[in-house]
Image (cartoon, rainbow, N blue to C red):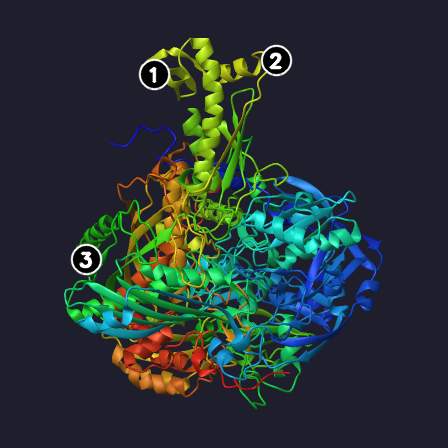
Amino acid sequence: MHHARRRGNRGHVTLNEIILHVNGRAYAARVEDHWTLLDVLRNQLGFTGAKKGCDQGSCGACTVLLDGIAVQSCLVLAVQSQGRSIVTIEGLARDGRLDPLQSAFHEVGAIQCGFCTPGMILSAKALLLRNPDPSEDQIKEALSGNLCRCTGYVKIVQAVKMAAAERSQAAGAAPQDVALRADPAPQAGSGT
Amino acid sequence: MKPDYVNIGGRMPRVDGIVKAAGEAMYAADLSLPGMLHGRLLRSPHPHARILGVDTSAAAALPDVHAVITSRDTSGFLAGGIGSPGNEPYLALDKARFVGDAVAAVAAVDEETAERALELIDVQYEVLNPVLDPFSAMRPGAPLVHDDAPGNLSFETDLSFGDVDDAFSTCDYVREDEFETAPIRHGFIEPHAALASWETSGRLTFWGSKQSPYFTYRNMAKALGIPMSRVRIVQPHLGGGFGGKNEMFNVDFCAALLSITTGRPVKVVVSQEEVLYAYRQRHPAWIKLKTGFMNDGTLVAVDADIVADGGAYKGIGALSLFLMCTFLALPYRVPHLRAKGRRVYTNTQPSCAMRGHGVPQVRYAAEVQLDMAASDLGLDPLEVRIKNAIQPGDTTGNEFRITSCGLTETLVAARDTAERWRREIPAATEPHLKRGIGVASYGYVSGPRIAGHNTSAALIKVHEDGRVGLATGSSDCGQGSSTVLSQIAAEVLGVRLEDVQYASLDSEIVPVDPGVFGSRVTFITGNAVKRAAEDVRRQLAGVAAGILGVDPEDLVFRDRRVFVEGDPERGIPFDRLVKSAQYSGTGMTLLGRGYWAPEGIDLPRFDTGMGNQSGAYSFGTQVAAVEVDTETGRVKVLRLAVAHDCGQPINEMLVEGQLEGSSIGGVGHTFTECIQRRQGQTMNASFLEYRMPTALDACPVESTHTDTTDEMGPYGAKEAGEGVQVAIMPALVNAVHDAIGVWFKRVPITPEAVVAALRGSSAGATPNGGAKGGADGDGPDEDRGPT
Amino acid sequence: MSLPRFTYTAATSVEEACSLAGSGTMFLSGGTDLLVSMKQRIHAPARLVGLAGIPELHGVAETQAGGLRIGAATTITQLAEWALTVPRWSALGDAALKTSSPLLRNTGTVGGNLCLDTRCSFYNQPAIFRARWGACLKLGGDVCHAVRRSTTCHAVYSGDLAGPLMAWGATATVAGPAGTRTLPVEHLFTGDGARPCALASDEILVRVELPQPPPYARFSYQKLRLRDSIDFPLMGVSLFAAFDGPGAGARCRGCRIVLNAAGPAPVVVHEAGGLLDGAVPTEELAADLAPLLRAEARAVGNTAAGAGYRIEMIEVLVRRALRALEG
């Protein structure tokens, strides 16, 4: 899956030309090996919707979807992201229409300063892709790596519930939206 | 009956919600300009050190480095200070005063090059003995943080009314306790960021993550020695503030000076790690509190001695102490009060305003002590609060004039909630889990006056298509002010919220504003917007009156129409009216202007604490239900409820959001958040180790508001959301007592503290090290100073 | 803070990865810990060799012998999701879900968590800290900031998976230039806080394998932490026991108890396991077991909670593990 890397020089610095697939489009980016996906998304490709909160994987503001999985792009190297599908907050709207999660966040008041919002929505998106009808506890668990100081999470959880309910009402959910597992209901102490 | 509003009081999504949901909202760090350079700051690793020399030559010689600046390149301007001169240089002059104090700054083609250049700067320090806590700082002979502050005293205030000593002698019951609160963080997720662009003509344009942009406007001009009108502040979206982004910081100054030096735009974005060790915190406070009651629960006298750790600089800390003292007068009737406050310098991060500004610390002490007293007196603490609740028309001993006040109503509502919860919440199923319910109350300001200029202003431009442009000098840091202010404009003009476009703040044309602090925006800027909209409405009414042949006074603006009162058919659509106005005669330009500040508000008398601080006061009561794991000491918050008097809510949904966020933030402050320091070093400068609540800590937050309308507030509105953070800590602490019978006089209540308390030992009950002992850590090496 | 400059090589086979090892080279698995410490300039390797592209390191599957094979580059989420769908492994899935946050589990790997660098309040710090305090033992200096005059490093092994895997009796397969070797998971740990991982610098962890659980096996992992997400463990107790039958009243027939986050390495407390053998687990047994575990704990004041509290919690965690096993 690795694309051919063309090496160029900027002084003593080696730049690799890589192809990143972001929001359904291929982008050629000239990057150094040690650049994070977050920095390349923001600085090279202009996807500033991915936010740099803590830059250490403890706040979730930089969350993107990598092959449908929510990851913190501050802890992924850009060169590791070649050949994979990257979705940022800018890629959620379709044909000028917001994703139901985006609409729900807006409508129920789940957004205040908005800095955690892109990451929060993408974590929620990853959840709903795997589990279209999550319980409240599952929503809280799925968002528990994304910090928000403004909302106290109450309306965020409500927004995810609302978006999930809208999805399940919408006829003909896409096949890829089927849950990978229905309700894990983990049980402590269960063995063989 | 309340008036039939269209745009006021409902649940309306925020005007900036869609751009934020779509990821289109631009914050300061998201912006870039052609030719832009990147700046980074070099910080002192020592808490207290004389700077003997700074050699920047190697850094300056690094390719792609455009400039290296130190204090030698500055005018030495000293920031901060309210009521007295400031003492904080943007780049350290003679000394570094805390770990993280900025010493130099670099601009380079990219952040990495700037970071490499920092490593090449050679600073010669003479390491000085630091003072690390306020009590050792006040000891005779302690090293001085500032030579002109003997005893390291930063600010002192002494408020007194009634006859406190005499009053205590008449009391049936007097108790005295010492309380302590930890240093904590604002916790915004967006780190400080600034972009500055200097033009040769002498104009600076600045985009920064500033909560109160006009603080920066004023200080930038002074620090750079240029006229204020040549400083253009443009406000991008702001990723949270909570009081921690009010002041202009070194990041802002260095971006500007580096731009001037290099002739290129310069962006400086600090890391969250730097935010956590090198910027502001809430004042940790030690509060000795003595309160006297009669046997029936009547509150008679309060005597408080407050010491707060101000950290290395003055900042706006005088106001923090002033508020700590004066707000002991609310929310109960206190006939006799003395409150002595001392702010003390230490070689740690500077303390400043944070949501609730000083009041959370003292109300924590007072509300917990009230429960302790009620318990001793065999009274219901809620009834004691009701008995003493301040009432409309009261004037406190320090001259707060209480106008609208629904405190008693909130207490009654809280009593109902607590009773319902006791029925609804089952007892814990496992014996090691104990549940409890607690309450606490607050009173808060709607915009304190801190300096001469207290006026906010608004501008309105009506577009030809009938849409309304609105601009004010108050920035929206997430609290929703742009929405609330747009609703007010829409209501006056009879259009819909979506017809109002809230413009981004640009100091070149948008009127000056004191700032976004002290819960002033809805109350004060809201009134200014109302007046600006009324100004436009008057202009339009004049035109409509001509068209319809009626008196302008008889016109109603509603549902995007202007019509004759009592005869809705006789009217004209709003957009048609605008067009008519614009094309009448030689063409009318529809601009509205409004400004407002409450009359008769006193300037703070910092020495005595007297004076009416606000045009209105908000009130509320918080109810909390907790479950204590008596084995591990962890506390889970089950439910929260806020009954509050914010006057007429402008937007129910946004008010709820404020209450929820403020409350859950307080959950963190009560149980998990504390800045840990060793030898003045912040040890938990990460979101991994500084533990803010996650979604798993969220709990339902019920809210009810009283049927109150404030005569001065726009459409009757007052403060919401900041005041509630005042009562959350004590409500939780009282709930923990209800569960396990232990009073915690220190917050946060760590699991260790709970376990130790249940064992009957005091060990481990000190979260932030017990500064009175002189140590700032409990590790084995606390007395070893690294060199 | 940017990452320090390095060359990245994505290895495509175990052999290639081992051949690239050398001075200044580090292996990169999920990166959730290593990249953070590189941003803090605790590490600045000249080369990172990425392991994620090695197919052999991926996958979770039952073996023909009825055991479980987990590739080292399997993410913790992948392990949890797989295990939770298979009843006999679901307790392992529960344990995996106690690791960190969902976001970090999506990137962090099983191998990375097992080979996690030890942690210490005085070690996991930005560069400005070391500019004043100097390098500690773990960084090649000659002082320990956590324990005065200590000549050994007290950094704490803070992985979550080692305890459960050791309790299940897992083995690790390690590849190096000389081929592969298989060892008990507990042998991955040196017990030295400064160099906690027993692998040679040119060896990589390929997979872990759990033996087929005996009939009527039960397991519980109890983790002490201050928040239910993101946090590393402050103490952990894993308890795995085979029983002579189903339900309450069954007796233990072989039991392993592991203490993690109690010192520089996770420890199997054999004596405690032995004590439980033949017993019907009840909460009351915690009082007997706890002293045996406490004797193995090496907690000092270098984490978010005090050493005394962490030690005291051992008994609580043991009690809860026993309760979970009561059936």
| Mark 3 vs mark 1, CA separation in Å | 47 Å
**Are the numbered discs 3 and 1 placed on the same chain, yes or no?**
yes
Real-space CA distance between mark 1 and mark 2, rounded to the nearest whole angstrom: 30 Å
Foreground of the two, B532 or C224: B532
Tell whether label 2 touches label 3 (CB within 8 Å). no
Quadrant where the image shows the C terminus of chain A? bottom left
Give the number of the disc on residue B387.
3
**Is there CB contact under 8 Å for labels 3 and 1?**
no
Amino acid found under the numbered disc labelled 1: Glu
Can the viewer see residue C241 in this picture?
no
User: SS at mark 3?
Assistant: helix
Q: Hey, what amino acid is under mark 2?
A: Thr
Label of residue B586 in the image: 2
Query: Pointer 1: what residue?
Result: B565
- Return the x and y of residue C323 as percentages of the image width and height: 28, 72
**Dots 1 and 2: beta carbons under 8 Å?**
no
Task: Compute the Cα span from label 3 to label 2.
Answer: 66 Å
Element type at mark 1: loop
The answer to whether any part of residue B669 appears in the image is yes
In the rendered image of this protein, does residue A153 appear above or below residue B492? below
> Where is B55 relative to B407, above or below?
below
Query: Where is residue B46, by image quadrant?
Result: bottom right
**Lateral position of residue B83 relative to residue A173, left or right:** right
Could you say where residue C111 lies in the image, as x and y percent from the top left? 56, 68
